[in-house]
């Protein structure tokens, strides 16, 4: 698959206030692209405060240390894509890639598409030194330890893959706010606890940002920013992301 197989990207490096609005923005960009058949999107963002984000089907009591999060002011949110619970915040750079479904190889296989997206990013990260590889269904790993996970959402014409790359997030925070490791886990985890399994990528934030950009945007290209669908974000915030019935659905 070459860059010529999909249209030029639009790029957005923007963080909205609070985790709920940022999850709503990701979904709004996907819905808008699907409905209008707009060009691909690359988005990056990073919360200034800690938050736990569950996958769409996570069981809250198993995935999150709920009482501790509430006592210490750590927001608990649920995204619209699959996968497990993650801790994000300062030191965790989030990325979102939105592409036409027919632009990705193996587009009917969810894991294959995630590995393809993360593989492009891993290739660019290796140019900076770390021997990053793709393991599991779409993790970035360094020395057999996870530094990024990914999740996916598909609509009729477009799919979204988003990931969080850890570069300065203390591993003890992960164990403090997430539940025990899930029963369903990649073979390379080998039953390890969060502290022994997760690591930070030893690169500065700007290098990671550049690697993500280089994975999708050609040198010298000046991509336009996508329009931010404000009304759709507001609708999704009310109907889903700030609604306790959605957050605590399982």
Image (cartoon, helix red, strand yellow):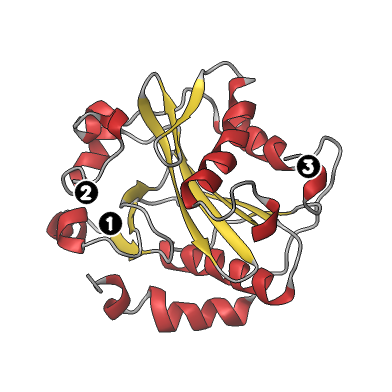
Residue 177, labelled with which disc?
2
Whichever of callouts 3 and 2 sits on the residue coming sooner in the sequence is 3
Q: Position of residue 159 (x, y in %)?
A: 58, 60
Frontmost residue, 67 versus 136: 136
- Label 1 and label 2: CA atoms lie apart by 8 Å
5 versus 190 height, above or below? below
Whichever of callouts 1 and 2 sits on the residue coming sooner in the sequence is 1
Whichever of callouts 3 and 1 sits on the residue coming sooner in the sequence is 3
Q: Residue at x 35, y 26 (%)?
A: 145
Q: Quadrant of the N terminus?
A: top right
Image side of residue 141 versus residue 170, left or right? right
- Local packing at callout 1 (Cα closer than 10 Å; few below 14, some 14-19, many 20+) is some
Q: Residue at x 68, y 77 (%)?
A: 35
Q: Residue at x 19, y 33 (%)?
A: 193
Q: Which residue is mark 1?
A: 74
Q: Quadrant of the C terminus?
A: bottom left
Asked if disc 1 and disc 2 are in contact, CB closer than 8 Å, the reply is yes
Frontmost residue, 83 versus 244: 83
- How many numbered markers are drawn? 3
- Local packing at callout 2 (Cα closer than 10 Å; few below 14, some 14-19, many 20+) is many
- Label 3 and label 2: CA atoms lie apart by 39 Å
134 versus 73 height, above or below? above
Q: Residue furthest right?
A: 220
Q: Position of residue 91 (x, y in %)?
A: 43, 38
Residue 137, labelled with which disc?
none
- Label 3 and label 1: CA atoms lie apart by 40 Å
Q: Which residue is mark 3?
A: 3
Q: Position of residue 171 (x, y in %)?
A: 28, 33
């Amino acid at each position: 698959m070459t860059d010529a197989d999909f249209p030029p990207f639009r790029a957005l490096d923007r963080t909205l206030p609070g985790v709920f609005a940022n999850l709503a923005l990701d979904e709004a960009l996907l819905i808008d692209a699907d409905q209008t058949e707009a060009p691909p999107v690359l988005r990056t963002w990073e919360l200034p405060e800690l938050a736990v984000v569950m996958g769409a089907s996570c069981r809250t009591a198993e995935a999150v240390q709920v009482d501790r999060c509430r006592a210490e002011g750590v927001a608990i949110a649920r995204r619209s894509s699959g996968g497990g619970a993650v801790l994000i915040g300062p030191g965790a750079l989030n990325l979102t890639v939105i592409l036409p479904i027919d632009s990705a190889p193996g587009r009917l296989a969810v894991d294959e598409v995630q590995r393809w997206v993360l593989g492009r990013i891993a290739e660019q990260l290796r140019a900076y030194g770390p021997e990053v590889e793709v393991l599991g269904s779409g993790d970035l790993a360094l020395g057999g330890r996870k530094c990024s996970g990914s999740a996916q959402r598909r609509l009729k014409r477009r799919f979204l893959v988003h990931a969080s790359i850890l570069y300065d997030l203390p591993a003890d925070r992960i164990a403090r706010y997430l539940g025990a490791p899930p029963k369903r886990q990649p073979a390379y985890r080998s039953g390890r606890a969060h502290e022994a399994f997760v690591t930070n990528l030893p690169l500065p934030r700007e290098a990671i940002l550049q690697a993500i950009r280089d994975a999708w945007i050609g040198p010298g290209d000046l991509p336009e920013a996508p329009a931010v669908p404000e009304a759709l974000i507001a609708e999704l915030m009310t109907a889903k992301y700030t609604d306790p019935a959605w957050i605590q659905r399982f």
